[in-house]
Image: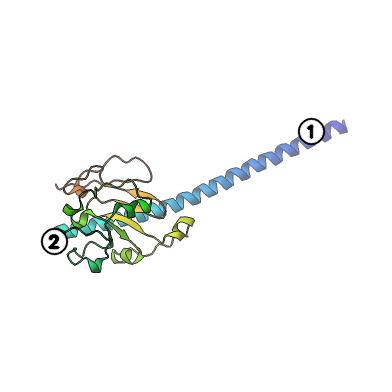
Amino acid sequence: MMKNNSGVTLISLIITIITFLIIIAITIDYGVSTLHDATNDKFEAELSLVQEAVIQKYSLMKTLKKDGKIASRISSNTAFESDSQRPEELIGTRIASTQTLTANDFTTFLMDYSNPDTMTYEQYYYLLEQTDLEKLGIEKSDTAPTEASEKSERSYIVNYYTGEVFDIANKKYYKTDTNPTQNSIYLPGTTHSDGDEINYNFSDD
C-alpha cells in the first residue's frame, strides 16, 4: 500500500510540474506578445503622424498655389537649401534616384521615375531625418531602441504627391492610393489590407 501511495504521489508531482511549466510558458509568451504589440502600435502611431504632417504640408502648398515645377532635370539628391525653386512646404532631402529607395528596402513605391524631366518637386520621394521631422512638428520618439532603429534613427521616405510614408527602420509602409494620377492624395484610398498599410480617404468635394 505504501508503494502504491508513493507511485501516486510521484505521478501527481510530475503532473503538477508539467502544469506549472505550461502556465509559465503561456505567461511568458503572452508578455512578449503584449510588449511587441505595444511597440508596434507606437511605430504605427508615429507613421500615421508623419503621414498626416505630409498631407498637411502638401495641402498648404496647394492652397498657396505653389506648383513646385522643376525647370530642368536634376540627377542628384538635394537638401532643401540647394533646391532654390522648391516650395518651402516640401521639407527633407529630395531623392533623385530610385536606387536610393531600393537601397533602403523601399521597393513598392508608386511614383514612376522613368521620365524625371516632367516630374514636379512634390512628385519626388523625400528622405525625412530627425531634424526634418522636427520641422514638421514631430518630436523625437521615446520608443525604446530596437536593433533596426539603432541602425537608422527615426527616418522616413515620404511622397508629398501620393501621401506615401515608409518607415526605414521598421519597414512599415502607409499609402493613400495604388494608382496615382493628378492630385492623387485627394483620391479615395485603397482597401485596408494589413497592419503595415493604412489608407486615408480624401476627396475634392
Residue pictured at 68% horizontal, 39% vertical: 18
Residue pictured at 86% horizontal, 32% vertical: 3
Determine whether, in the image, residue 1 is placed left or right of residue 19: right
Give whichever of 159, 101 is nearer the camera. 101
Name the element at disc 1.
helix
Residue pictured at 83% horizontal, 35% vertical: 6
Residue receiving disc 1: 8
Residue receiving disc 2: 64
Q: Residue 78's spot in the image, x, y percent?
A: 26, 63
Determine whether, in the image, residue 108 is placed left or right of residue 114: right
State which mark lies toward you, 2 or 1: 2
Q: Residue 145's spot in the image, x, y percent?
A: 47, 60
Q: Residue 127's spot in the image, x, y percent?
A: 31, 59
Name the element at disc 2.
loop
Task: Name which residue type carries label 2.
Answer: Leu
Give whichever of 82, 60 is nearer the camera. 82
Give whichever of 175, 46 is nearer the camera. 175
Q: Quadrant of residue 120?
A: bottom left
Against 104, residue 195 (above or below) is above
Determine whether, in the image, residue 73 is placed left or right of residue 14: left
Q: Residue furthest bottom?
A: 81
Determine whether, in the image, residue 9 is placed left or right of residue 77: right
How many angstroms separate mark 2 from mark 1 (CA)?
84 Å
